[in-house]
Image (cartoon, grey):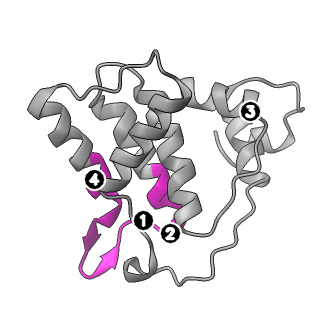
């Protein structure tokens, strides 16, 4: 579980919980915006297209083709998740919004192939849009993405 026993886990611990804990500890947050949704840069459909084109350039063999109309709806649904609010209050704090997008992209599975890869790149792009950086070792990021 995040924030408990994994806090004392050695660097050699490869469990997803330990990796996530180490990644979160090393996350360099440079957000200057407030916690309110009007100050967060959200991912939209044009951002998703940009990430798809970027991945197609880096990984030409990966087919990031949407699963028809349903795939497009699932993608848009995942991109809209972090905007949720209740009684005028955001459901997710600033950085958790990026995590919500990743979770929903992986759960919704809008693409025929490359869903985890797309979700990971979408998180990196979301963080970049919001002036954040994720200090993580590539192996840990891969392990986290396939978890």
- The residue positioned 31% from the left and 58% from the top of the image is 44
Between label 4 and label 1, give the one nearer the viewer: 4
Toward the top, the furthest residue is 61
- Reply above or below: 21 against 90: above
- The residue positioned 70% from the left and 51% from the top of the image is 24
Q: Which is nearer the N-term, disc 2 or disc 4?
A: 4
Q: Position of residue 91 (x, y in %)?
A: 36, 67
Residue beneath disc 2:
94
Task: Examine the structure image and report whether residue 94 is included in the region drawn in magenta.
Answer: yes
Residue beneath disc 3:
138
Residue beneath disc 1:
92
Observer-nearest of 147 and 64: 64
Magenta highlight range = 78-99
From where the camera sits, is residue 86 visible? yes
Q: Which is nearer the N-term, disc 2 or disc 3?
A: 2
From where the camera sits, is residue 147 visible? no
- Reply above or below: 19 against 126: above
Image quadrant in which the N terminus is located: top right
- Mark 4 → mark 3, Cα distance in angstroms: 27 Å
């Amino acid at each position: 579980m995040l924030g408990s026993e994994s806090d004392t886990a050695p660097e050699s611990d490869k469990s997803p919980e330990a990796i996530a804990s180490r990644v979160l500890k090393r996350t360099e947050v440079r957000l200057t915006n407030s916690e309110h949704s009007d100050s967060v840069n959200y991912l939209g459909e044009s951002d998703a297209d940009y990430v798809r084109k970027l991945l197609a350039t880096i990984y030409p063999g990966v087919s990031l083709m949407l699963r028809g109309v349903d795939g497009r709806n699932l993608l848009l649904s995942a991109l809209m998740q972090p905007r949720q609010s209740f009684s005028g209050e955001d459901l997710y704090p600033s950085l958790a919004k990026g995590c919500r997008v990743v979770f929903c992209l992986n759960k919704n599975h809008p693409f025929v192939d490359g869903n985890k890869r797309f979700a990971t790149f979408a998180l990196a792009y979301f963080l970049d849009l919001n002036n954040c950086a994720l200090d993580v070792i590539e192996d840990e990021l891969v392990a986290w993405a396939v978890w």
